[in-house]
Amino acid sequence: MDLLAFLRYNKKESRVENMERLQKFLSRCGVASRRKAEEWIQEGKVTVNDVTVTQMGYQISEKDIVKVDNQIVQVLEKKYYAMNKPRYIISSVNDDKNRKTVVSILPEALQQEHLFPVGRLDYDTKGVLLLTNDGTFMNQLVGPRSTLEKEYIVRVQGIVTKLKIKKLENGLQIDNYRTRKCIAKIDSIDRKNQSTLVRIILQEGKYHQVKKMFAAIGHEVKRLTRIRFGNILIEGLKEGEIRPLSIHEIKQLYVLSQQDKEFETLKARKF
Ligand code: URA
């Protein structure tokens, strides 16, 4: 066999075999994030064809039988939904204090789909939250390299000045971290009740980020609503309602999570 034929043969073979790293397979099946899967592998919880595998990056093919804690793991049909999360609901699958979660409030049939939230919204935040059983999709959208925009409407205590808006936009120190550039705009000022409504677009999503950013400029957040997650808007969804995403919306989310163009020329010079 000449070299070209050999390379062609090998390429064909690897396509037939469709090899994949074990931790990637587990996250693709929706049973865990890739990091969690790596922990399980290190802890010796994962077997391939009944042999425990602790080697990170171990390659498996479609023919292999993978088990976690002796339970067979299989590729699930991928599911993608958008929810308008109400306030006072936890953004997780279970809650150790038995409070309602974004999964426990789903219709019965959807509770069997192994869904988990794509990132988090605080207990007292409402708005757009995606749910999926696709770990790769989740990592792509909320991983550290994602540039996906999240847009919030924030009611804060006190009158926010334009100077403070600039501070938010230029990035500021919260905890041990400097926030990335963002876009913010005053929507309205309520002088009677001494509060301001601000619209803000972030490309990141650190823990309590919006609340901490406003705290850093001296304003307490009273109410927080996420009105957009990438291309997915809150419009058309009542509180607690859920709808499937279209193929087009899913593809677009992937594209948007890798796009920036200097934050779309600072959101076409502010919205
Ligand atoms: N930032 C916050 O502070 N809370 C949220 O729920 C989302 C973003």
Image (cartoon, grey):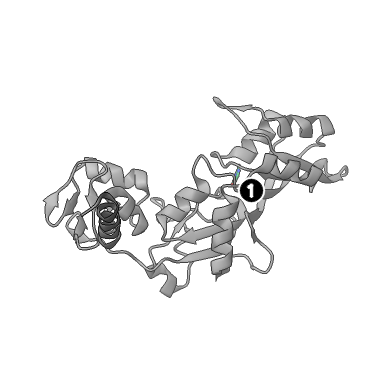
Residue lying at the far right in this picture: please name it: 191
Q: Position of residue 37 (x, y in %)?
A: 30, 47
**Amino acid type, label 1:** Glu
Along the line of sight, which residue is nearer the eye, 106 or 178? 178
Q: Is residue 245 visible?
A: no
| Numbered circles on residues, count | 1
Mark 1 residue element: loop
Quadrant holding the N terminus = bottom left
Q: Position of residue 49 (x, y in %)?
A: 13, 57
Ligand 1 falls in quadrant? top right
* Left or right: residue 30 compared with residue 19: right
Q: Residue at x 54, y 25 (%)?
A: 176
Q: Residue at x 60, y 48 (%)?
A: 148
Along the line of sight, which residue is nearer the eye, 51 or 106? 51
Q: Position of residue 179 (x, y in %)?
A: 62, 32
Q: Residue at x 41, y 51 (%)?
A: 97
Q: Is residue 150 visible?
A: yes
Seen in the picture, residue 195 relative to 92 is either above or below; the reply is above
Q: Residues within 10 Å of mark 1 (few under 14, many from 20)?
A: many
Seen in the picture, residue 221 relative to 226 is either above or below; the reply is above
| Disc 1 target residue | 149
Q: Quadrant of residue 264?
A: top right
Along the line of sight, which residue is nearer the eye, 219 or 205? 205
Along the line of sight, which residue is nearer the eye, 8 or 1? 1
Q: Residue at x 11, y 51 (%)?
A: 51
Residue lying at the far left in this picture: please name it: 51
Q: Position of residue 153 (x, y in %)?
A: 72, 49
Q: Quadrant of residue 202?
A: top right
* Disc 1 CB within 8 Å of nearest ligand 1 atom: no
